[in-house]
């Protein structure tokens, strides 16, 4: 286990609040990172994606950097604009 994972594990044991908020924050970060990666793989800029889904570049930036409370319809529109499809799973 690397140093970062050890630190996170230690902090989760020390603080219930940290454990709860870390997991939620990580999921938000992961969604934004996946969207950024898909956009970059498609070879388009934030501005181009914004035009395709009829929004502003700042909205795309906000989603990629902190994707909290993003609508499912927005995720679907982004996926379609990138030539992808959206899969949702409950595990």
Image (cartoon, rainbow, N blue to C red):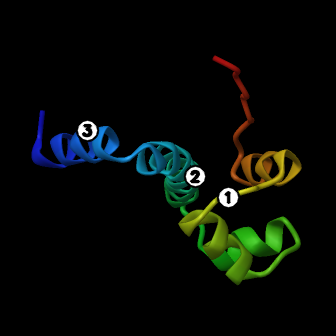
Give the quadrant of residue 72: top right
Which badge, 2 or 3, comes first in the chain's sequence?
A: 3
Which x, y percent locates residue 4? 19, 49
User: Mark 3 against mark 1, which lies toward the viewer?
Assistant: 3
Residue lying at 11% horizontally and 40% vertically, measured from the top left: 2
Residue lying at 48% horizontally and 49% vertically, measured from the top left: 17
What residue is pinned by disc 2?
28
Give the quadrant of residue 63: bottom right
Give the quadrant of residue 32: bottom right
Marks 2/1: CA distance?
Answer: 5 Å
Tell me whether the residue at label 2 lies in contact with that at label 1, contact meaning CB atoms closer than 8 angstroms.
yes
Marks 2/3: CA distance?
Answer: 19 Å
Relative to residue 50, is residue 62 drawn left or right? left
What residue is pinned by disc 1?
68
Relative to residue 86, is residue 13 drawn left or right? left
Circle 1 Cα neighbour tier, 10 Å, few/some/many (<14 / 14–19 / ≥20): some
Which badge, 2 or 1, comes first in the chain's sequence?
A: 2
Residue lying at 50% horizontally and 60% vertically, measured from the top left: 40
- Which residue is more in the foreground, 19 or 50? 19
- Which residue is more in the foreground, 85 or 66? 66
């Amino acid at each position: 286990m690397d140093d970062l994972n050890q630190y996170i594990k230690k902090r989760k044991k020390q603080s219930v609040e940290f454990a709860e908020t870390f997991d939620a924050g990580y999921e938000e970060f992961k969604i934004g990172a996946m969207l950024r990666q898909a956009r970059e793989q498609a070879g388009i800029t934030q501005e181009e994606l914004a035009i395709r889904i009829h929004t502003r570049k700042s909205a795309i930036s906000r989603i990629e950097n902190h994707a909290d409370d993003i609508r499912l319809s927005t995720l679907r529109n982004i996926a379609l604009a990138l030539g992808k499809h959206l899969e949702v799973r409950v595990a």
